[in-house]
Image (cartoon, rainbow, N blue to C red):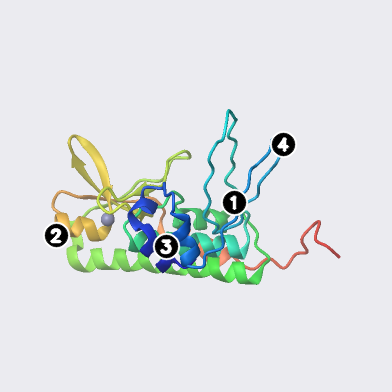
């Protein structure tokens, strides 16, 4: 099913995360549908990108795991959904930019295709951080104080309170109902174009990000347990 077909079928319902389709619509759109009863002891594995529904037909325990193996297909599907969410103003549960920097910091990747896609996302993110800093410098010079506030270890990823997009590294903070809220650059400018009541924080120094970027290289070491 292409995103466009999904959109035609029921975009609003997908956005809120609960969508029970009309089977005739799916048949008409030639979307293959598999329907079966999961018996006690059965484990059902649903692959990346497969829309699915579960309905109880009696008393049962519902146990489900979301797994994210670090493969090209999984990561590509995650990026695709993340971008689709942005275009359709849906909040992404997984903060992909934050996750990608964590992968670059902590993991070795030996699959070239996966490596190149991760590197591409890092490039886009680094470019955005650099351009944002440059823009702030050019537009606001010394009128704006950009403060360093490093992340705490259990700090969650930040999302824009207005448009729900992930806000990575450079946070535009304002006070709303006596609470500090974060916005992205675009929403901040729409709200306060001179940034008069905005505090700008950065959580990772640019040098730190460029070091992580440079050090993230394709791992050429043999992978243990690989088939010979
Ligand atoms: Zn925003």
Residue 41's disc number? 4
Discs 4, 1 touching: Cβ within 8 Å: no
Q: Position of residue 182 (x, y in %)?
A: 28, 47
| Quadrant of residue 152 within the rendered picture | top left
Q: Earlier in the sequence, mark 2 or mark 1?
A: 1
Q: Quadrant of ligand 1?
A: bottom left
Residue 74's disc number? none
Give the distance between the C-alpha atoms of the residues marked 3 and 4, in whole angstroms.
32 Å
**Discs 4/2, front:** 4
Residue at the spot 60% in from the left edge and 30% down from the top edge: 60
24 sits to left or right of 58: left
Q: Earlier in the sequence, mark 4 or mark 2?
A: 4
Quickly name the residue at label 3.
6
Quickly name the residue at label 1.
35
| Quadrant of residue 143 within the rendered picture | bottom left
Q: Position of residue 20 (x, y in %)?
A: 44, 49
Residue at the spot 69% in from the left edge and 35% down from the top edge: 40
Quickly name the residue at label 2.
193
């Amino acid at each position: 099913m292409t995103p466009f077909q999904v959109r035609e079928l029921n975009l609003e319902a997908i956005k809120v995360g609960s969508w029970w389709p009309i089977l005739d619509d799916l048949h008409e759109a030639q979307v293959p549908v598999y329907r079966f009863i999961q018996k006690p002891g059965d484990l059902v594995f649903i692959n990346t990108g497969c829309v699915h529904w579960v309905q109880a037909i009696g008393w049962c325990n519902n146990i489900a795991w979301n797994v994210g193996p670090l493969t090209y297909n999984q990561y590509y599907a995650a990026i695709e959904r993340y971008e689709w969410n942005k275009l359709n103003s849906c909040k992404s549960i997984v903060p992909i930019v934050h996750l990608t920097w964590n992968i670059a910091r902590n993991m070795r990747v030996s699959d070239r295709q996966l490596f190149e896609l991760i590197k591409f996302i890092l490039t886009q993110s680094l470019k955005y951080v650099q351009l944002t800093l440059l823009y702030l410098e050019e537009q606001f010079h010394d009128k704006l104080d950009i403060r360093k506030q490093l992340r705490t270890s259990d700090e969650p990823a930040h999302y824009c309170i207005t448009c729900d997009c992930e806000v990575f590294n450079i946070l535009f903070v304002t006070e709303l109902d006596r609470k500090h809220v974060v916005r992205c650059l675009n929403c901040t400018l729409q709200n306060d174009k001179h940034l008069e009541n905005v505090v700008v924080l950065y959580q990772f120094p640019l040098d730190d990000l460029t070091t992580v970027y440079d050090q993230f290289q394709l791992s050429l070491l043999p992978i243990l347990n690989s088939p010979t």
